[in-house]
Image: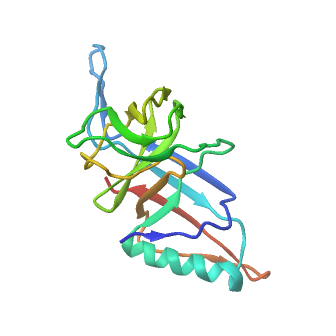
Amino acid sequence: MSIALPLSPSPSSSTPSYLDYGGTLRPIFGGAMQKLTRLGDRFAIEVTLPPLPYAETGMLWIARLIRAQRDGAIFPWPQPDFDTGAPGSPVVNGSGQSGSAINLRGLANGYTVKEGQFFSIIHGGRRYLEQAAATATVANGQLSLPITPMLRISPQNGAVVEIAKPMIEGLLDGDARSWSVDLARTVGLTFTITEMK
């Protein structure tokens, strides 16, 4: 089970990434290029934390990151200065869904999901981060939402959808966890989380 990383302090900087597992065919004799779209595009984020006092918060962060090295990590996805509002209690509406749209229910009537807004779907105990590909407004508590990337899983009916506070869940990059300690007894930490699937 993935480890929830502490929520405080907030990162001093973060670099979200979209990882494209498709490809571009570039003909050697000047023909038309082709874009291959493959299932499996996903997200990653590189996080740098501010200097942490070792005894106050540094030890906790180090302990969680060491556990996450083995078990995976869960961390809030940044949407700076964006207020997600009160979306209700969204869940997946219907099983067997696939492709570039998802049907949801349990949302607050009139709630608007904005193009570019992130959310996560919990399926099989793991989160999958998605992004709204168009702006859509809820009617009768339901919504059909275009998304990117394509669904990597077929979520079960009633699977929880985290719109108010989307999270990324994945593995920490690299084979080691290290941290710096300076004369002020503060700890410096940087890590990258990449979705597994």
Instruction: Give the residue furthest to the top.
Output: 31
Instruction: Give the residue furthest to the front.
Output: 140
Residue at x-position 66% and y-position 45%: 80
Residue at x-position 24% and y-position 38%: 97
Looking at the rendered structure, the number of numbered marks drawn on it comes to 0
Left or right of 161 in this view: 17: right
Instruction: Give the residue furthest to the bottom.
Output: 55
User: In this view of the protein, which residue sits in the foreground, 112 or 23?
Assistant: 112
The x, y position of residue 174, in whole percent, is 43, 66
User: In this view of the protein, which residue sits in the foreground, 1 or 163?
Assistant: 163
The x, y position of residue 161, in whole percent, is 41, 49
Q: Quadrant of residue 20?
A: top left
Q: Quadrant of residue 29?
A: top left
Quadrant where the N terminus sits is: bottom left
Q: Quadrant of residue 83?
A: top right
Residue at x-position 25% and y-position 50%: 156
Placement of 63 over or under 125, stated as above or below: below
Residue at x-position 53% and y-position 69%: 5
Instruction: Give the residue furthest to the right.
Output: 184
Q: How is the image coloured?
A: rainbow
Left or right of 107 in this view: 158: left
The x, y position of residue 79, in whole percent, is 60, 45
The x, y position of residue 166, in whole percent, is 50, 51
